[in-house]
């Protein structure tokens, strides 16, 4: 078999009127842009020859739709009973394709809408592939198995024998599968299932083990568990949690090991176990090395009334007539009892009664004196008692660090959760300080608590980002600009994780999303450029590189044209802690910029009709200039915004900044086609995201390479048109030069600036609202528009590139 798959097989499909396209080698991804257009037209002779020359070894894909007249049902389940039920409902077709699992069945296309059927658990059952979808054709090589796709016949030979499905095929499948006893997700639009990253689930398991250890030790008094009960809770927690985990199943023994490790570590520091901790321990459990160690440590450090009496009676017998010896024995006993935090006051009183009785004739001890000695020794023996505020801060960080590495950056604490850093609130750290210094003289006032937290911040100050690698966290790993999935790692400094997996093969499978965009822009002459631009805008947002290309995004048009749906889709794809909503009129306010820390998207919504945008601050935020800000009541600090700024408005941006620096920092996409009231779908964005958020993300990421290679966004014609309007609105000199017939652009010409200014003033007074700018400002605005201003021999100002008409 030849390895030049596309070169050998594509002409056979083309000859039968099937508009196949080249895919990447051993891949499901198209190797060309705007591939979906070939659902509606055949590739030209020139395109066919170029593809054969450029992609001879590529796989083959068939875009479905009116051109081929074909569609397909892609069955994506390995449940044999379910597959049998589906095949019993579908018309028999002469073309069935087999890949890694499931099967694809070809039918005649009747303009049906694309749809997906999911099970009640959210898992995919089947998908209808129509316009906007493509399917890998034999003899392409499957990317996972390395084997060719196969079919029971050649599609080009049987295409005219394919049956119709009917326009109501989705309803039929739902109804008939329901009668056969198979439960489907409601409407195929169930809420998306969030996946917990493997690293994050491990951290959560460790955090849960720490909680159980505190309960067993009696530190956390919210409930009470024996060790056996805690082990049972750990196993139950893992079983409940595993269903939502990406990757291999969780091993409850890892959680058990952490629980026992925490207990042993605390006992090594001098803690003891409360009464009843070992209830139900079997001999096999006691033989476990760590449990045996816990038992040994607790036996040495744990005291009872009986043990204390026996110990002291034995000491008396050694030197019954030595007063100094008896005094030292009393002191040693009190010290040992004080070290056991579970040895309570009534037990101490019982032991002291025994001591007083046995030493009455020689020592004459008083109970209050012994109590004071016990209290003093308990304070000094407290394993949590710190020596200084710095020690308190270290203890706080050590305790917090059990749940994940802690860093202080950008004015706040962050904690690694196994896949990304999460903001750790000031109140949370404050509470840990409170727990560490109960009744300590070191921390009694608010200023003391603040001092400890400030020391902790200095001790763990470190930048979140350690490497110059931009990317985005998915549940299955960190995806860089090369689209390679790497393990989650603190060095990337990610501050959120998308709760679904990255699968590059799904980049062509967001059919509802494509249909929506086609309904918005399908009749526009620059449709392809708008699609490319939007893909790049999504990519820049997800990767956090929007500031590198220094443009804010404006979706411009009347209400009901779809622009708000785009923002809703983007917002719904991202976790809440990745999105801000800070409008540009607030960017200059004190404290406000803290909202942008750790955010990749700032979805601002509408532009104000008459609100002026502060040009300098706007340009700084859009281009990612380091900003000085502060949290209320905290020290000021510097941070660098990375978020993309999104707007949806029927107003163009206004600013007193008349320079090109303001206008060139926008990318504007038009939305001109209002949706008829009867065609509106409530919750459309949520429906699209529920079904296709992973596919939309994969599609968006495909735009990053083009953005990087071109060093900027694709700029459709609608953008250029709207940007010219923005220039006119914000620069009266620009509007004057465009409208005034008395001045023409002449590359070799020149004229006196005063003459041009007089015409400008007259024009403003006669035709425009507002006041003309001053003469000096007029010259600056000419220079900003690219015209050179200089002095002639008479020292008059002259502008080159313009001349008086006639």
Image (tube, helix red, strand yellow):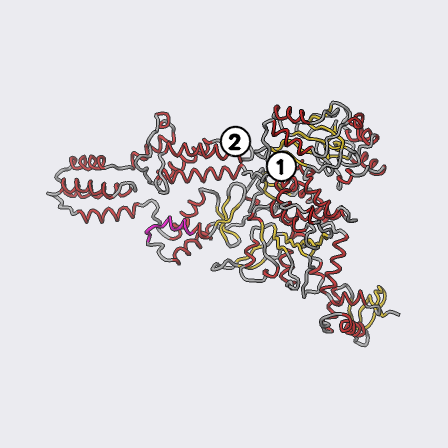
Q: Which mark identifies residue 619?
A: none
Q: Is residue 493 visible?
A: no
Residue 682: within the magenta? Answer: no
Say which quadrant the C terminus sits in.
Answer: bottom right
SS of the residue at dot 1?
helix
Q: Residue at x 57, y 48 (%)?
A: 578
SS of the residue at dot 2?
loop
The range drawn in magenta is 430-440
- Between 771 and 66, which is closer to the camera in this rendering? 66
Q: Residue furthest right?
A: 806
52 above or below 727?
above
Q: Nearer the viewer, mark 1 or mark 2?
A: 1
- Between 575 and 142, which is closer to the camera in this rendering? 575
Q: Main secondary structure of the magenta part?
A: helix
Q: Which mark identifies residue 249?
A: 2
How many numbered marks are there? Answer: 2
- Crowd rating for badge 1 (residues with CA inside 10 Å; few <14, some 14–19, many 20+): many
765 above or below 390?
below
Q: Residue at x 33, y 32 (%)?
A: 278
Can you give x and y, in whole percent of width and height, for residue 741 in the image?
84, 68
Residue 607 figure quarter: bottom right
Whichever of callouts 1 and 2 sits on the residue coming sooner in the sequence is: 1
Can you give x and y, in whole percent of width and height, for residue 747 in the image?
84, 64
Q: Which mark identifies residue 188?
A: 1
Q: Residue furthest left?
A: 361
357 above or below 653?
above
* For residue 493, side relative to residue 99 (left or right): left
Q: Is residue 617 visible?
A: yes
């Amino acid at each position: 078999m030849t390895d030049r798959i596309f070169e050998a097989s594509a002409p056979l499909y083309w000859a039968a009127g099937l508009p196949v396209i080249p895919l990447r080698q051993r891949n499901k991804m198209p190797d060309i842009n705007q591939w979906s257009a070939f659902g509606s037209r055949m590739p030209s002779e020139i395109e066919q020859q170029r593809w054969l020359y450029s992609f001879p070894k590529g796989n083959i894909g068939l875009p479905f739709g009116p051109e081929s007249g074909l569609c397909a049902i892609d069955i994506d389940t390995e449940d044999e009973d379910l597959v049998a039920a589906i095949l019993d409902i579908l018309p028999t077709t002469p073309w069935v394709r087999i890949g890694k699992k499931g099967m694809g069945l070809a039918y005649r296309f009747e303009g049906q809408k694309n749809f997906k059927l999911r099970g009640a658990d959210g898992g995919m059952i089947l998908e209808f592939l129509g316009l906007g979808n493509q399917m890998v054709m034999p003899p392409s090589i499957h990317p996972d198995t390395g084997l060719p796709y196969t079919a029971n016949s050649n599609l080009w030979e049987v295409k005219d024998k394919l049956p119709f499905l009917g326009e109501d095929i989705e309803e039929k499948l739902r109804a008939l599968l329901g009668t056969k006893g198979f439960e489907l997700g409601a409407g195929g639009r169930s809420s998306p299932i969030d996946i917990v990253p493997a690293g994050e689930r491990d951290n959560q398991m460790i955090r849960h083990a720490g909680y159980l250890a505190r309960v067993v030790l009696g530190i956390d008094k919210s409930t009470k568990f024996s060790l056996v009960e805690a082990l049972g809770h750990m196993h139950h927690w893992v079983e409940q949690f595993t269903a939502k985990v990406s990757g291999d199943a969780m091993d409850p023994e890892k959680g058990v090991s952490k629980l026992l490790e925490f207990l042993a570590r605390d006992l090594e520091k001098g803690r003891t176990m409360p009464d009843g901790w070992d209830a139900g321990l079997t001999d096999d459990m006691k033989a476990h090395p760590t449990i045996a160690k816990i038992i040994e440590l607790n036996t040495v450090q744990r005291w009872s009334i009986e043990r204390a009496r026996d110990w002291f009676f034995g000491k008396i017998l050694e030197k019954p007539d030595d007063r100094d010896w008896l005094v030292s024995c009393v002191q040693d006993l009190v010290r040992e009892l004080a070290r056991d935090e579970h040895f309570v006051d009534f037990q101490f009183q019982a032991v002291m009664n025994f001591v007083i009785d046995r030493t009455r004739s020689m020592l004459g001890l008083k109970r209050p004196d012994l109590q004071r000695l016990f209290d003093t020794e308990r304070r000094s023996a407290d394993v949590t008692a710190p020596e200084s505020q710095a020690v308190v801060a270290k203890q706080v960080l050590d305790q917090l660090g059990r749940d994940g590495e802690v860093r202080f950056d950008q004015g706040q604490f962050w904690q690694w959760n196994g896949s990304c850093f999460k903001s750790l609130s000031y109140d949370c750290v404050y509470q840990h300080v409170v727990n560490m210094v109960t009744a300590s003289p070191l921390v009694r006032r608010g200023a003391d608590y603040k001092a400890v937290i400030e020391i902790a911040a200095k001790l763990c100050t470190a930048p979140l980002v350690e490497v110059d690698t931009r990317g985005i966290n998915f549940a299955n790993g960190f995806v860089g600009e090369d689209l390679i999935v790497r393990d989650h790692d603190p060095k990337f400094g990610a501050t959120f994780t998308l709760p679904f997996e990255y699968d590059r093969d799904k980049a062509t499978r967001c059919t509802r999303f494509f249909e929506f965009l086609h309904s918005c822009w399908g009749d526009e002459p620059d449709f392809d450029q708008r699609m490319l631009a939007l893909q790049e805008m999504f990519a820049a947002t997800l990767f956090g590189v929007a500031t590198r290309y220094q443009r804010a995004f404006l979706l411009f048009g009347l209400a009901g044209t779809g622009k708000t749906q785009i923002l809703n889709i983007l917002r719904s794809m991202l976790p809440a802690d990745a999105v801000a909503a800070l409008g540009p009129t607030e960017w200059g306010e004190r404290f406000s910029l803290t909202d942008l820390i750790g955010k990749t998207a700032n979805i601002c919504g509408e532009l104000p009709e008459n609100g002026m945008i502060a040009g300098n601050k706007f340009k700084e935020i859009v281009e990612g200039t380091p900003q000085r800000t502060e949290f209320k009541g905290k020290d000021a600090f510097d941070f660098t915004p990375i978020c993309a700024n999104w707007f949806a408005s029927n107003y163009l941006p206004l600013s007193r900044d008349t320079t090109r620096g303001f206008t060139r920092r926008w990318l504007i996409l038009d939305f001109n086609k209002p949706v008829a009231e009867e065609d509106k779908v409530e919750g459309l964005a949520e429906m699209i995201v529920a079904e296709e958020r992973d596919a939309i993300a994969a599609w968006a990421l495909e735009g990053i390479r083009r953005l990087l290679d071109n060093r900027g966004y694709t700029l459709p014609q609608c953008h250029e048109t709207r940007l010219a309007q923005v220039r006119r609105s914000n620069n009266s000199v620009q509007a004057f030069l465009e409208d005034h017939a008395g001045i023409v652009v002449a590359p070799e010409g020149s004229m006196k600036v005063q003459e041009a200014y007089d015409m400008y003033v007259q024009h403003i007074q006669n035709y425009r609202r507002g006041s003309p700018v001053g003469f000096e400002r007029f010259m600056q605005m000419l220079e900003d528009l690219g015209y050179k201003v200089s002095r002639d021999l008479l020292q008059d100002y002259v502008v080159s590139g313009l001349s008086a008409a006639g």
